[in-house]
Image: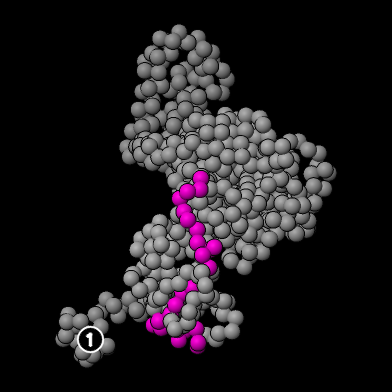
Amino acid sequence: MGGSPPLAVRFDHVSRHFGDVKAVDDLSLDIFDGEFFTFLGPSGSGKTTCLRLLAGFDQPTSGRILLHGRDVTGQPPFEREVNTVFQDYALFPHMSVGDNIAYGLMIRKVEKGERRKRVAEMLDLVRMPGLEQRTPAQLSGGQRQRVALARALILRPRVLLLDEPLGALDLKLRQQMQVELKAIQEKVGITFLYVTHDQEEALTMSDRIAVFNNGRVEQIGSPPELYESPGSRFVADFVGVSNLISGPIAERIRGSAEVFSVRPEKIQIRETDSIAPDGYCSIEGRVKEVIYLGMHTRYVVELDGGGDLTVVEQNREATSMEVLAARGRKVRLVWHPTHNRRLGTAE
Amino acid sequence: MSPTRPARDRDSQGPEERPVLLRIASFLYLRPSLVLALLLGPPLVWMIVVYLGSLVFLLIQSFFSLDPFTGQVIRVLTLATYKDLWTPANLDIFFRTATMAAVVTVTTAVLAFPLAYFMARYASTRLKTVLYLAVLLPLWSSYLVRVYAWRLILAKEGILNWFIQQLDLTRVLDLLLRAPVIGGPSLSVSFLGMFIVFVYVWLPYMILPVQAALERVPRSLLEASGDLGARPGQTLRHVTLPLAFPGVIAGSIFTFSLTLGDFVVPYSLGNSSFFIGQAVLSLTGTAFNIPLAAAFTVVPMGIMAFYLVGARTLGAFDAL
């Protein structure tokens, strides 16, 4: 334990039940100071409930929540040193951008000149200098997002909570904001707790990710750990695309019927008469579907003996004509066995 | 003609022979301005002819005058009637009515807000329906009946007096009734009683718009305010109230203007000190001075216009 940074947040056996529904079920996890930590999971998996418990909008049915070592369970939001960026931004429509950002300072009775100075700093940080006088209605979605971020950051919270803040933005803007958010986090050095259902977003920004499923955490790990060593079938399937292989086919490939997974980009497509390199896994099948995606192509290969495998290949040399002509062709799939992942043992 | 046409169209001769309804629908679909004209025509005609038209006639009437000897209306435009309006007695009536309207409006707003807040924030869908009904139910019965019912409730022998006696508060009531202006021989003949009845009859008109305005405030705004350190009272002051204010103004337009023009409540519960509505009633009735009656009704319109401009200056509509 000696080398780890101080704790920012600790969930200690936290549950939140709504009647019979266990939205969060006996959850324990630690988030370290300065981390970009992500709650990843499908909708209804309990990740947003967890965030609301930490913000203080909701109280746990049982368990404790610690913020920098202090028990905050039972404290209202206005006593907690965390701030939130809401999914719908929640900007006050009757206030200007400047007044929105200064809201927390106004409540704390910070003197006007100081407020103005810090609002300007925040607008610089989110790259919207000089827009104090605008109203939220005059802003684009991306700009509203930045104002919401500035409003939450101006109070210099110890932990910033972000509830799917990029969900309403289009893909290009979302990708740009992901990079920017990460840069801002590194600049201000505040712990970010990010909630998303988008696995790519989680992989892009996070230091560590907790994968949520049915109110429980399936696995916690860095993006490479989760991607390369998924601990469960759910994680393998939710983080990236996985081929799950079991039964007789698994037995033919690995000599054991135990379920395992292999990522689509690890599989190579060869001619049927080619011989698989020594020690490689190999199986034959027929290309059922070809989905041309520009940068790469996704093939669905129907295996001899039943079941499909998804294969992704970069379109480095192949033209779209060549790629699409592969439909219906008999092929041999080969991959190195180091890419096989046994599931269900870890965590 | 096409062999793939469904069987029910077997008899039709081609695409021109579409059903009439479909043809009308297509015709209208391609002419949105015609649809708009058809939709807006009747209400616009109604508004312009009946509503604005009668207002314009009213305005014109107020610029006519009454011949003091024959009692005939002289149809020549003049400001003489407005000069007659400008007497200390009449100014008293305007002041009395406007003050009552203002006090009633403020009171209904204060009473309506907590209930509207509860309905918008906390009530379940079921409870909300029940509360809607409870708010609207009084409006199902005749307004006259309700005002007379209140006269009985407020009367010296009425239930309210009995209740006050049981609570041993008769002295407090007597003290109130002895007060100048608001007092009177009993609650049923006093401005205090009138005020109570006005608040009662106009309260639903305040609750509903305030509730609608509060309903439109997303929960996340209130959470964001708390998240940024505001205590519930501060959230109320800085977020909830400013966003509910347009609803309060909408409601106050009802309560204020309805009080300004009402004659039933002052007639039933008042004394010889007239309100605008009573003055108009007596001028159109016994005195038959239509021009002066018209001039009298222009006054509340002026007060309302003044009120709305004032509300806008105060920023009441900024959050719309």
Rendered location of residue B287, percent (x, y): 45, 41
Q: Is residue B241 visible?
A: no
Residue that numbered label 1 is attached to: B4
Q: Residue at x 44, y 36 (%)?
A: A17
Q: Is residue B202 left or right of residue A90?
A: left
* Vertical comparison of B230 with A183: above or below: above
Residue density around tag 1, few if under 14, some if 14–19, many if 20 or more, within 10 Å: few
Which residue is at 47% across, 38% downward? Answer: A25
- Where does the image place residue B254, in percent across and percent down from the top left? 49, 43
Magenta segment boundaries in residue numbering:
A321-347
Quadrant that contains the N terminus of chain B: bottom left
Residue A302 colored in magenta in the image: no
Which chain letter goes with mark 1? B
Horizontal side, residue A91 vs residue B296: left or right: right
Q: Quadrant of residue B225?
A: top right
- Measuring 33% from the left and 39% from the top, which residue is drawn there? B140
Q: Is residue A336 magenta?
A: yes
